Image (tube, coloured by chain):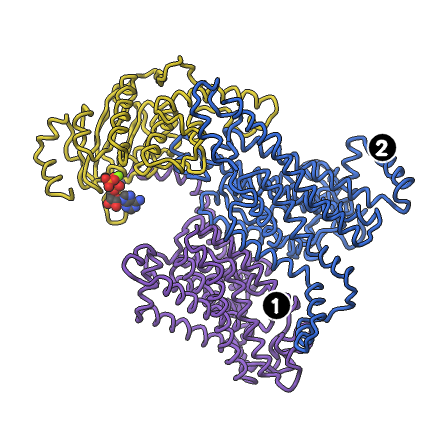
Amino acid sequence: MGVSETYARGRRLAGEQPFAIVVGLVAVWLVWFLVEGLVTGRIRVSNVLSYAWDGLLRGLIVGLAGIGLSMTYSILNFANFSHGDYITSGAFSGWAVTYLLAGLGEANIGSLLLVGAGGSVFGGALGIGITTSPLAVVVGMLIAGAASIGLALFIDRFVYKPIRDESGIALLITSVGVAFALRYIIVFVFGTDVRGTTSAGEVPRVSFYLIDGSFRINAHDITLLVVAVGLMLGVHLLLQTTKLGKAMRAMSDNEDLARITGIPTEQVIRATWIVGGGLTGIAGYMFVLWKGTLGFNDGWLLLLLVFAAVILGGIGSIYGAIAGGIVIGLTASMSVIWIPSEFGRAAAFFVMIVILLFKPQGIFSGRTTA
Amino acid sequence: MTETTLYDRFERVIDTDPKLVVAVLAVIYLAYIASGVAFGYSLRGQLNSLANLTFYIGVFGMLALALNLHWGYTGLFNIGIVGFMGIGVYVTAILAKPPVAQGGAAQVGGFGLPLGIAVIGGVFMAAFFGLLVGLPALRLRADYLAIVTIAFSEIVRFTMMSRTFQEFTVPDTVLGYDLAADTVGLGGGGGLILNYASPLEALLHALYLWEPYLGFVSFVQANLIANNPRPVVDGVVYGLLLLAVCGLYYWLLTWTGESPFGRVLKAIREDEDVANALGKDTNRFKLKSFVLGCALMGFGGILWYAGRGSITPPSFRPNITFFVWIALIIGGAGSNTGSFLGGAVFAALLYEGPRYIKNLIEVAFNLGDGPGNFGQAMAALGSLDPVPFVLYTLNSISELRLVIMGVVLIWLMHNRPEGMLGHRKETAASIDLSRPGGAKSDAAAADGGDQQ
Amino acid sequence: MSEADESAGEPSIPIEDTDEMSTVPLEVENLRKTFGGITAVDDVSFEVEKGSLTGLIGPNGAGKSTTFNLITGMHDPDSGTVRFNGEEITGLAPHEIANRGLARTFQIARELEEMTVLENMMLAPKGQIGETLWRSVTPGVRSDVQRQETQHLERVWEVLDFFEIDHLAEEYAGNLSGGQRKLLEMARALLTDPDMLLLDEPFAGVNPSLEKRLLEHVHELREQGYTFLIVEHDMDLIMENCERVIVMHQGRVLKDGTPAEVKQSEEVIEAYLGGEV
Ligand SMILES: Nc1ncnc2c1ncn2[C@@H]1O[C@H](COP(=O)(O)OP(=O)(O)OP(=O)(O)O)[C@@H](O)[C@H]1O
Ligand SMILES: [Mg+2]
């Protein structure tokens, strides 16, 4: 230890050290900017709180979708670029059913099943919302999960399984093909338009007055919070208490070893797609309920944030994915305090890149593997 | 024995590859000419269609060659191609656009530099950003590098779209120089209008070929196309120019690959630690390869977009990156000939082809107008009338194209990951490596056996 | 940049003269490396003399390969120093160490699979001007590159002949057998013009007759002035061929002496008989 260690490290880290210093300085500046802004009243406390709330909810969606990505990344050993389009597929399937249930009798079935493609029906007009049409929403959400599970299993059977033994890169490239095929099948069926899905005006909400402005929470925020936290707890119990969970953890640690010790790997892989796919589909559905619009690019645009979350949390760690999702969501939403709002997502990507460069094993790694 | 070996090599490198390229291109062009005849195109229509085809063969050929340097030679998984293309063309546009006073009210201006200098600037910036990304990121695992590069290309696109960078006011003088520009910027969501002389015109002026070119155009007008032949001739000549640039890329990258430099790249692709243990500073090699490839991608982007009326951010979505990757995988990563052919086949069959097939079907069967959405198509199908569904499918061909591409990519990865030319032995050396003087004879026995 | 040596027709590999002929090219002092909880190398010190053939032995997991990795810069030591030809090389990057004349082979042969044997070999020579990109692609200058490649090629074929793998020259390295790969790795390492070679189990998986031939090569090369440090599990082989043996056990140097001394050492006998083997 001591001198020669510093010497050895110093030589190799010489190039990185300035980066670390820059990152530190940036952090100091960020804090100073916020504190100064709050003190002088340039930044409103209520706004900061609104951003944080928004970021937390966005983060829950990213984290929920991230669990599946993280599990497949570690168990099947590849970065699945079609994961974003599983999100979109789940959302469209679920919303088709929600439209159908909410609008039965009010519009023709075709338009409803196509989620109002081409402006034929509007979600607002159907009065869709958790309070106005709870059954349609709950059933739609479940269908979203089921559809994503079916899709994930189908694609795994016909696309990934035949090349299971190829390198992670070959699988990655294949998954890009899956992503584009799925995305444009969705376009073929549902069209390219971004539609409004909920009747925004009818969603009940409460407003608090907080020091210097108001702060709102609506019913869909709460729905998302309840569903996401509930599912996350469910996954936690599944992994900690069932045999399946143990097998999954063993496989994400070392697939070969798991195979030798007699864990039926294909079965575990199927279970992984079921759990991951279900959460992903529901995440897609809840995302649309929460933001009130649906378009064919939603999942793709979310995908890089999901990757960011998974990498941040350490690939293979489910708690990491959740925590990473929240950090990424907060970054994307709260960054508008410091930078123009167009760069919220860019800021999240930037955080991901910095993590990849300096701590590619993730910031929560080394604790739990589940 | 060595004579046959030498001859084999000669045939493989000098003879067979060009033959193959010419043969593939001939088939493609004949198919397009034949479909043009089927459409009853006039000469003008034929030339337009061929010029368009050539344009896409050119740009995809170029980009696939550049990507081959990254992935095929060095094993660098870059899926941020479109970001480097965008940087190249945006910088070119900003440098070449006339100052705002000349450009009309709503638009931001540029520096009004000659197009040639602007292009150099664009390529340089693409290379510079390659350096910026590569310097920290090239030591990452392949899948992490993929995520970093695609995130980078999206950040580039967000920047193009952002209001923040839409417009800047340029100071009157910078370090004593009086700059022509008043305001410059990326134009935000509306993009930039490219109100400068067309690249072809600028190039011909620079080569003192402008007058002969105009003469040629009037010749065409007098003899072949009476009515406004300029756009047609421009298109054809620009297409040929792109093919010539492809030739330059091919030559540059073949010399790069067939050299001690290329050999180190190949070694890095195979096992970086070994290259290191043999005394190669692999980080430097990777960086050089990455920066060169990014510069070539930037130039590809410029040649693709700088001749258009305008550029807008949606053109620079990751779709193009995906196109280039398919082109490379069709052709086979690792081979320059394969890369170019992959670009050509991709452009002809997957990129442009579906539209032609749609047109052919429409010409062959007069089917009328299609339904507005999938629901109507399905409803008709339910009542046993397939025509609306077929029409809807045909009208959605530009979206279905991407589905086909995705499926083709999956099929290739399942059945032919080494590309259409199969496994090719392209030796990474500037000279023939067979035994000098050819003293021993048993060397040749292993030589002939395993080539495809 | 040194040009490739132009040697006479017969297969021999001349070594480059070094000015300061240090008699102790490699000195390792108090080297230590831990991985998580395991101390793989624990306070290891030894020296290797010029022109010698030194054996490094020890049970599985004794830390031999890790020691190699520390010497050649593949891993950074936690503490300790490595000196080569009188110069401290601790913490240098692997390529910097290789370029100072310290070549290595890997325990599991790491050939470059999708490259031919010839390409593998052509990679090795130092000071290749064509490794600078602009030289390789500038018309005119490229002919200099080709001239130098032609010189290297001659040497490559000599070495291929020397190792009797010339009939495999055009084969992909990935298609070679285990023993052939070991030969290729050694041949490639030699082509870097090293002063010293670290060979990690060069004879593992090599059939006995090939092993004999390889050993003859090693002795031949040693007489030409190369220095060898060899990791090997075959005790008899080490005892017969090495003039000095270093025994490692659980990350430490247990014994350092002549084969006779090592054979009689109680600790060594205990380590081997009481230990894992
Ligand atoms: N990269 C690494 N990460 C973690 N542990 C390592 C690493 N490399 C080596 N070790 C550990 O260090 C110890 C020494 O390993 P090393 O490979 O040096 O042994 P060795 O003497 O070469 O054994 P063998 O004769 O089996 O090749 C072992 O316990 C091994 O598990
Ligand atoms: Mg070992």
Report the side of B132 relative to C241 (left or right).
right
Q: Are marks 1 and 2 in contact (CB under 8 Å)?
A: no
State whether residue C90 is above or below residue B185: above
Residue in front for this viewpoint, C21 or B387: B387
Report the side of B445 relative to C29 (left or right).
right
Please state the horizontal and vertical placement of residue C225, each as a whole percent of the image.
29, 18
Residue B280 visible in the snapshot: no
Residue neighbourhood size for the residue with mark 2, other residues' Cα within 10 Å, grouped as few (<14), some (14–19), many (≥20): few
> What is the drawing colour of chain C?
yellow
- The residue identified by callout 1 is A295
Q: Amino acid at mark 1?
A: Gly
- The residue identified by callout 2 is B212
Determine if marks 1 and 2 fall on one subunit. no
Q: Amino acid at mark 2?
A: Pro
Q: Is mark 1 within 8 Å of ligand 1?
A: no
Please state the horizontal and vertical placement of residue B234, each as a whole percent of the image.
80, 42
> What is the drawing colour of chain A?
purple
Which residue is at a point 45% across and 76% down the rendered structure image?
Answer: A226
Residue in front for this viewpoint, A145 or B11: B11
Residue C169 visible in the snapshot: yes
Q: Residue furthest top?
A: C8
> What is the drawing colour of chain B?
blue
Tally of numbered discs? 2
State whether residue C225 is above or below residue B20: above
Quadrant of the rendered image holding ligand 1:
top left
Report the side of C68 relative to C2 (left or right).
left
Dot 2: element: helix
Please state the horizontal and vertical placement of residue B60, each as a whole percent of the image.
64, 45
